[in-house]
Amino acid sequence: MKQQQPHFAHVQEHLERVRDGYSYIPYPESIYLGHQEGDHFWELIGLRLQGCPVIVLAVLRFERIERKGVADSRQSLASYLTENPDPDRPEGGRLVAFLPNKDEAIPQFLTGLRAGKELTPVSIDRARVEVAFDFRADNPAASRDLVEAAPPLTTHYYRTVEGHVLRGESHNVEPADAPFHRFIAIKSPQQLLPQGVIHMPTLIVAHRFIGLQVAVADEAARQSVRNWVPFVSSTAADESLLAMGG
């Protein structure tokens, strides 16, 4: 799928930054930042969508939040995707997005947006979003007050409904039949595949996409999980959760 190579390269470069333990993004304008609209801005997000075999790179609109020392701060991606549909908004529970052309390099796409290039918007049903991630090095919604008020994260193992096995830090996942479509942030995730382990950026995962989860609070639990069939890497899906095609 040659036409997807520019998009694949952009995701692969980010995975390499994650693997190398990056702490900042030096040039956000070439990595994720689109055009500005006063109190709002547009940002590149990676989306795994139900019914689409590859990751979709889309620019979404966020409301700017004032945060001292941090440019283009916004609410967390998990909160953004989870928020209840507003009947007073014409788009309802859908996301308005702009997509790059299949053979367009992402830095050029972002440059064009900031230069005022007109594109046809697409509508994304948030109920079809399975996984999302951004291209930042930190949580743009984090503040000292929020961090101190939040409950502690716990190491979990997860198995998605499509067989991906992950481990990372998060809060507990609510039942899939909870009201609205909820998402959870998984920090420092790793995907376990039969052929090895992949380090990934913070993942925002739909609750309904997680089939099994278990909290691992001590060494005894960790040893137990490693011997449970659903969490053994040999039984896991052998394709990356952030597959882009070849």
Image (cartoon, grey):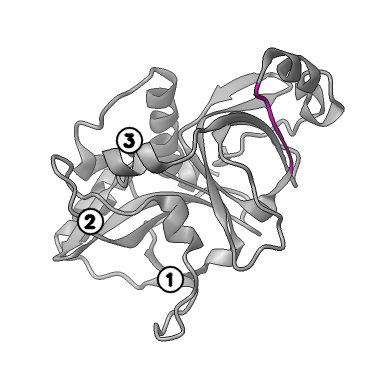
From the image, tell me which residue sits under label 3. Answer: 138
* Quarter of the rendering occupied by the C terminus: top right
Q: Is residue 74 above or below residue 179?
A: above
Classify residue 14 as left or right of residue 93: left
Horizontal and vertical percent position of residue 182: 57, 58
Say the numbered circle drawn on residue 65: 2
Label 2 vs label 3, nearer the camera: 2
Distance between the alpha carbons at the discs numbered 2 and 3: 15 Å
For residue 96, side relative to residue 49 (left or right): left
| Residue labelled with disc 1 | 122
Regarding residue 173, the answer to whether it shows in the image is yes
- Classify mark 3: residues with Cα within 10 Å, few (<14), some (14-19) or many (20+): some
Q: Secondary structure at mark 2?
A: loop
Residue 98 image offset from top left, x and y in percent? 36, 64
Q: Decide whether residue 25 is among the magenta residues.
A: no
Which segment did they paint magenta? 212-217
